[in-house]
Amino acid sequence: MQTILALDQGTTSSRAILFDRAGQVVSVAQQEFRQIFPKPGWVEHDANDIWRSQYAVARKALKQAGLQAADVDAIGITNQRETTLLWDRKTGEPLANAIVWQDRRTAGRCDALRELGHAATIQNKTGLVLDAYFSGTKLQWLLDHVPGARARARKGELAFGTVDSWLIWKLTGGQRHVTDASNASRTLLFNIHSLQWDEQLLELFDIPPSVLPLVVPSCGELGHADAALFGSPLRIAGVAGDQQAATFGQACYVPGMAKNTYGTGCFMLMNTGQAAVTSRHKLLSTIAWVGPGVSIQPAMACYALEGSVFVAGAAIQWLRDGLGIIKSAEDVQALAEQVDDTQDVYLVPAFAGLGAPDWDAYARGVLVGITRGTTSAHIARAALEAIALQTAGIFAAMANDSGIALSELRVDGGASRNDLLMQLQADFLGVPVLRPRITETSALGAAYLAGLATGFWTDVDEVASQWAMDRRFEPVLGANARTEKLARWGQAVQRAKGWVNH
Ligand code: ADP
C-alpha cells in the first residue's frame, strides 16, 4: 500500500492525483468536460460527463504511475461545491443536468424568501447568506420543473446529492447515498449546529426528506469503490468540498489559522475550531470538516469562517483578453514592476457585482484616479493591488467576526505564483504570507482526510509536518501607509457600488 488516490472534481475539469506517504505527488491526470449555458445566467453540467471524466482520470493516474488498485490504500474525494444533482434511485440515471453553483436562475426565489423575512433564520441555522449560489433553491427548482419529479420524490424514488454524493453513488454501484458534512453545510438545508438536516428549512424549500443523503464524517471509511471499476475494491475514506479540503491540505488545524486560494476568485477560510462563529460582516460560517469517525458527532466538528471574492485572477485575465496589455497572466508582474506605485489609481474589479463582505449584486467595475500620466503599468499594478486589497477586506472582517488576530496567511492557487502579488498581500495585511511547495491543496487535503481515517498517516501532527514552505513574504510597508491605502481602497469601492439598476 503506497499511495492515496485523490479525486478532485472541479468546475471545469476532473483531476486525479496519487500521493505517496510523504505527501508528494506520484501521478496526475486531468480532463476538462463540457460547460452548458442554456440561457444567460444559467450554468449546467451533464452528471454523466462528471462521472465519466472523473473515472477516466482516476484510471489514467494509476496507469501513468504503473500502479494497480493494490497499490492504493484509499480514495479521498474533493469537489466543486453546491452544484445540485437529482437522479433515479433504481436506474442511477440523472433526471436533468446538474445545476452548477454559478447558476443564477433561482435569484428571484431568494429575493422572495428575503422579503418574507427568512434570511436571518437561514443564517442562524446554516451559517449561509440567502443566495442562489447554494443548493437549496436549486433542488427546489428541479423538483418544481422536471415533470413528475416532486411526486416521484415523495414516493422515495429519487436521490438528491452534491457532486460528492454523486461520485460516491457511482463508485459504490449505488450502494451508498451519502454526503460529507462540509458539503451538506452548503445546501441551505443543513443545520450546522445540530449537524442534521433541518425540518423547518426542508419545509421552507419544499424538499421531501426522502431525497436526502445520509450525512457522514469528512474523515472516515464510508464504503468501497466497486471491484469492477479498479480491479479490486477500494475503500473511500475522506470527503470534503474543495475549499474546505484546501484548508485541510494547508494544515490549518489550529483555530486562527487561515488560507487564501487565488484562482478565478479568492476564497479565504479561517479555522474557528469548535465554534460556529456568526458573522456580522456577511462572511459565511461553514463546516470545515467532521471526524475522524464513522458517524456524525457534533464534538468532532471543526468550523470555519469563509469569505469569497468573485473576481481575483479573473481581473488579470481581463488585462490580457479585455485590454490586451499583457500576453499571458505571468506577464502582469513584469509590467506592474515598471512602476513603483499606482500613482493613486485604483481598479475595483466588481465585474460581476461584489461578494463578501459587500454582497452588492448591483456594483460594477471602476477604474479611478486616472491622469495623463497613467500607463498600462499603473493599471496592471492596480489590478494586482485590487486582488490583495479585496483579500485584506475579508481578512479584517474575519478578525472582527472571530476576535482572533491572524498572525499569518497560507496561500495557494494559480495567482499565488506571482511574487509581487504575494509581497503586496503581506504589505496590505501586515502579517507574513506563506506559500507552500505543494499548491494542489484541495487534492492533498482529500488525501489527508482519507489517509488519516485508514491509518496511512498516524495523526494530524504527521501530516502537518509535511507542509513545506516554498517562500515566506514579510510585510515591509509601514502601519500608517497601510491604513491610508486601505482607506483609499474603501473610497474606490464606494464608487463601484450600486452602479446598475435593481
Ligand atoms: P481556477 O482553479 O479558479 O481555474 P487557478 O488556480 O488555476 O484558477 O488560477 C488561474 C487564475 O490565476 C487565472 O485567473 C489567472 O489569470 C491567474 N494567474 C495565473 N498566473 C498568474 C500570475 N503569475 N499572476 C497573476 N495571476 C495569475
Image: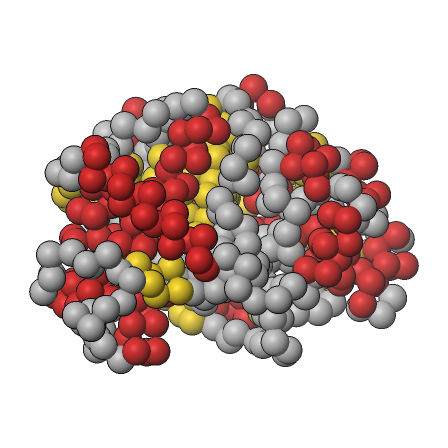
Residue 269 falls in which quadrant of the image? Answer: top left
Q: Quadrant of residue 392?
A: top left
Count how many numbered circles sit on residues in the image: 0
Q: Residue at x 48, y 33 (%)?
A: 304
Q: What colour scheme has been applied to the protein in the rendered image?
A: secondary structure
Find residue 36 and report its horizontal and vertical position in percent: 57, 76
Q: Residue furthest front?
A: 372
Image spot of residue 231 (x, y percent): 46, 57
**Residue nearer the viewer, 180 or 39:** 39
Task: Locate the C terminus by quadrant.
Answer: bottom right
Q: Position of residue 170 (x, y in %)?
A: 60, 57
The residue under the point 35% across, 46% down is 391
Name the residue nearer the viewer: 144 or 331: 331
Q: Is residue 174 above or below residue 32?
A: above
User: Can residue 78 be seen in the rendering of this structure?
Assistant: no
* Quadrant in which the N terminus is drawn: top left
